[in-house]
Amino acid sequence: MNVILLGYPGSGKGTQAKVLAQKFGLFHVSTGDIFREELAKKTPLGQEVAGYLSAGRLVPDKLVLEVLKTRLATETRGLLFDGFPRTVEQAEGLDSWLDSRSMAVDAVIFINVPEAEVAKRLGDRRTCLGCGKIYNMGTRPPAKADACDVCAKKLITREDDKPEVIIRRLQVYRDQTEPLLAYYRASGNFNEVDGGRNPESVAADIAGMLKGK
Ligand code: AMP
């Protein structure tokens, strides 16, 4: 089963992907996490993508597709995409890559959250430097202000969760990613979930949509 999670930055794709990957035995593919890892390790790829990430702009399609194909070449589990595809060109690239391996996208889940709500969530978001757990300082704060409940490592505000970059990322979503909704609505396996609720209810709904796929 190959699944795509779609939605604004801050709509809960990362949070949901962690739960669903575990529940369904899928391999969680987050292109944002891949780029941040490369950046932290200061690899040539990390240096190449740094400027895009800090500005809240999209990494060029060709590069994103190359990185993914390399990373997924030997993966045999079903794939759960979070933050990819982000453009129609990436979606077409994914379709043809899956097709060449006799696979397809089995479900697309659009996590629908209004823009004003995601803007607030991104501003309130803190991410654990150790295990990647995501906190919301307003609705889901950690027990200790700066430390992860799970691994006790430091919580940080992502560089691109700063206010001026948030505005750019929302604009980029509207311009370049939102057209994907029409692309996938036409595909027949499009599902929409109300992402404005607590993460457990959203996860339960998505799990129901994926059962039997
Ligand atoms: P995310 O963690 O998914 O919000 O991604 C963080 C940043 O990584 C984005 O703002 C982009 O700069 C870059 N990025 C992640 N995924 C993609 C993608 N599929 N296409 C282009 N850029 C991406």
Image (cartoon, helix red, strand yellow):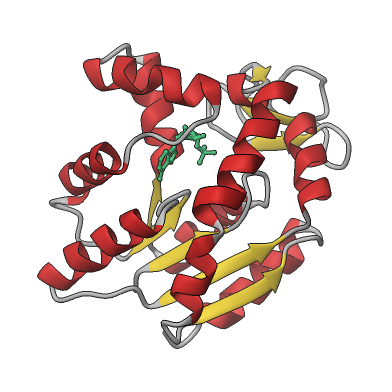
Residue reaching furthest top?
42
At x 87%, y 42%, the residue is 139
At x 21%, y 50%, the residue is 72
Viewer-proximal residue among 68 and 26: 68
Does residue 162 appear in this view? no
Image spot of residue 186 (x, y percent) = 45, 82
Direction from residue 199 to residue 92 in the image, left or right: left
- Quarter-of-image position of residue 104: bottom left
Give the vertical position of 126 relative to 145 (above or below).
Answer: below
Image spot of residue 51 (x, y percent) = 43, 18
Image spot of residue 99 (x, y percent) = 17, 72
Direction from residue 93 to residue 70 in the image, left or right: left
- In which quadrant is the N terminus drawn? bottom left
Direction from residue 62 to residue 74 in the image, left or right: left
Residue reaching furthest front?
175
- Quarter-of-image position of residue 213: bottom left
Viewer-proximal residue among 207 and 14: 14
Give the vertical position of 195 relative to 48 (above or below).
Answer: below
Image spot of residue 18 (x, y percent) = 53, 51
- Quarter-of-image position of residue 167: top right
